[in-house]
Amino acid sequence: MSVGPVLHYYDLGADVVAFSSTRKGGVSQGNYSEFNVNWYCGDSPEHITVNKEALCEQLCISQPCLVYPHQVHGTVVRQIQADFVSLSEAERKLLLEGVDAVMTDQQGICIGVSTADCIPVLLYDRRHHACAAIHAGWRGTVARIVEKTISEMCCSYHTQPEEMVAVIGPGISLEHFEVGDEVYSQFEEAGFDMSAIARHDEKWHIDLWKCNWLQLSACGVTPEHIHVAGICTYANACEYFSARRLGIHSGRIHTAIMMK
């Protein structure tokens, strides 16, 4: 079996690498097949280690520079500073526990998030050379984690949203994201324009891509600087992990960004 992740790259400029992993090019098996680096979904630690080593080799970085949190569908944003890579593995793990967005202004540190139907969002501040990776599931979207992350970047890096570029990566589409009345109500109570993000067939459908696009736009990110991958994980579960198609005991997409 080949070892070497097949990545879907995003063009955010010559000085940054941004991508989402596909299922191809790793050693994991079954519903984790083939490429998974997430420690928290039940995959074999041995397979995860091989996959992670292959990704680091492809990115030309050491393993401490591959940074991704243990997500909990919350809104905690963690800033990754220069001393992070010199910390012990236990200290790094503790800093990344219960975190759903990471940001940094350090070159050579690849920050990312794990998804399998939830929406990954990448941000890059071209002027101040700072970036972020966000896990926006429906709960995080309702809680406006994208808006919170941009606010944190503005405070920490003097980011101006109009100077940013953004990626909305692979995630479940409106067509396949059916929700109950209780989820619909949470979006409505959070102030979303339901006529813009929801549709009712036999059940409600919510457009998480659009929800996060609207948050980016409301913060001041220029619409033409927002790239939507347009890849539905549910409809493309052969290429991208989908928890709704494969179950929660399956792999996760790794969406990440690194400044050179």
Image: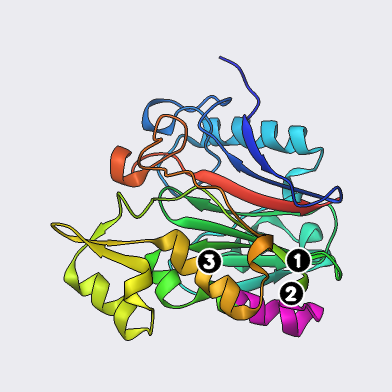
Does the segment drawn in magenta span residue 250? Answer: no
The quarter of the displayed image where residue 154 is located: bottom right
The quarter of the displayed image where residue 201 is located: bottom left
Is 96 rendered above or below residue 148? above
The quarter of the displayed image where residue 152 is located: bottom right
Is 225 rendered above or below residue 145? above
Tags 1 and 2 touching, CB below 8 Å: no
Q: CA distance from mark 3 to mark 2?
A: 14 Å
Q: Nearer the viewer, residue 36 or 20?
A: 20
Picture coordinates of residue 127, whole percent (x, y): 86, 69
Q: On the picture, is 202 further left or further right than 214?
A: left
Q: Nearer the viewer, residue 233 or 48?
A: 233
Pointer 1 residue: 104
The residue sitting at the left extreme is: 202
Magenta-colored span = 149-161
Rendered residue at 30%/40% (across/down): 245
Q: CA distance from mark 3 to mark 1?
A: 22 Å
Hey, what amino acid is under mark 2? Glu
Mark nearer the viewer, 1 or 2: 2
Pointer 3 residue: 213
Picture coordinates of residue 166, whole percent (x, y): 66, 61
Dot 2: element: helix
Q: CA distance from mark 1 to mark 2?
A: 19 Å
Q: Which mark is residue 162?
A: 2
Note whether residue 98 is visible.
no
Dot 3: element: helix
Q: Nearer the viewer, residue 23 or 196?
A: 196
Dot 1: element: strand
